[in-house]
Amino acid sequence: MAVTTGVVLARIGSTYRVHTDEGEVTAVLRGKLKRQDDDRVVAGDVVELERTPDGPATIVRARPRRSVLARRAAGERSPRAQPLAANVDQVVVVASARDPEPNLRLVDRFLVIAEANRIPPVIVLNKIELERRAEDAFQRRFGPAGYQVLPTSVKAAEGLPALRDLLRGRASVLAGESGVGKSSLMNALYPGLNLRIGAISEYWGKGKHTTRAALLVPLAERGYVVDTPGLREVGTWGVDPDALGSCFPEFRRFLDACRFDNCRHLIEPDCAVRRAAEDGSFDPERLVSYQRIYEEVNVPSWSSGRRRAR
């Protein structure tokens, strides 16, 4: 029986689309893997396959992941981590200049998850033709952290060559809430990917969830893009509360200057991070995001989900 390796492109029910050197194949999990947990294999996983002349291939082993991006599993009373994508080289956080209005708290959470998993993030500000001033606002908030902010527009054909260069040769997760235009950007860069474009609800101002599951898309210039469903809640999984400050790069040069080694940057006296925020060294709203995320990761509870991304 022939054994080969491949990269998981997507899960569709109980089957998987897997990209191999010989082309794309359909595969199913071996029984032992099925019993381990429902998220054992996700988009981006490198898997070993047993091929047969007829019928689907069988995934017999998933190789160790070098990175993983996870979120809170939706709709469960007992929260757990739900892996979205594996073996990621960068997280491309997509926000829109308008329609929907940018959710900066949510952007902060994506950045923290990337930093906590040691996955380099970059910010794409899409639909820039709708609100030019949004770029300055994003630079003021995220520039002190050293994050690249790339303005793009499908309608005005702006920033697309730079985005193509950013994606070339890398495995990239596209993260962002529904309606910000992730699928539109991919269709503009790589016509024929056939990612469905979600229409914006005029009444609610929220995108419809038209990209149903995480999908790994092989790119012509090598590399992959993981197009994820729109995420309305993101959990900061696996983040050590004591290390959360380091997930905000603009805080790092002030951390050792706090009076107390275990300063939480909440109410402690002589906190260098809070003083830097007051002095304008970085956007004070980033400190507010830190403090809210700290409350969540320090005392995790399902009720904290009601307070997220305010």
Image (cartoon, rainbow, N blue to C red):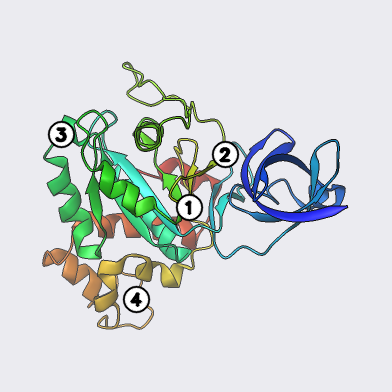
Distance of mark 4 from mark 3, alpha carbons? 39 Å
Q: Marks 3 and 1: in contact by CB < 8 Å?
A: no
Residue in view at x 23 percent, y 56 percent: 142
Q: Report which residue position mark 1 lands on.
A: 223
Point out which mark residue 263 bears. Answer: 4
Cα distance between the residues tagged 3 and 2:
32 Å
The mark that comes first in sequence, 1 or 3, is: 3
Amino acid residing under circle 1 = Gly
Q: Farthest front residue?
A: 22
- Residue 145: x, y in percent? 25, 64
Asked if one can make out residue 106 in the rendered structure from this viewpoint, the answer is no
| Direction from residue 75 to residue 61 in the image, left or right | right
Q: Nearer the viewer, mark 1 or mark 3?
A: 1
Q: Which mark is residue 131?
A: 3
Q: Could you tell me which residue is drawn at 27 percent across and 45 percent down? A: 161
Q: Earlier in the sequence, mark 2 or mark 1?
A: 2
Residue at mark 1 to residue at mark 4: CA–CA distance: 41 Å
Report the amino acid beneath label 2: Ala
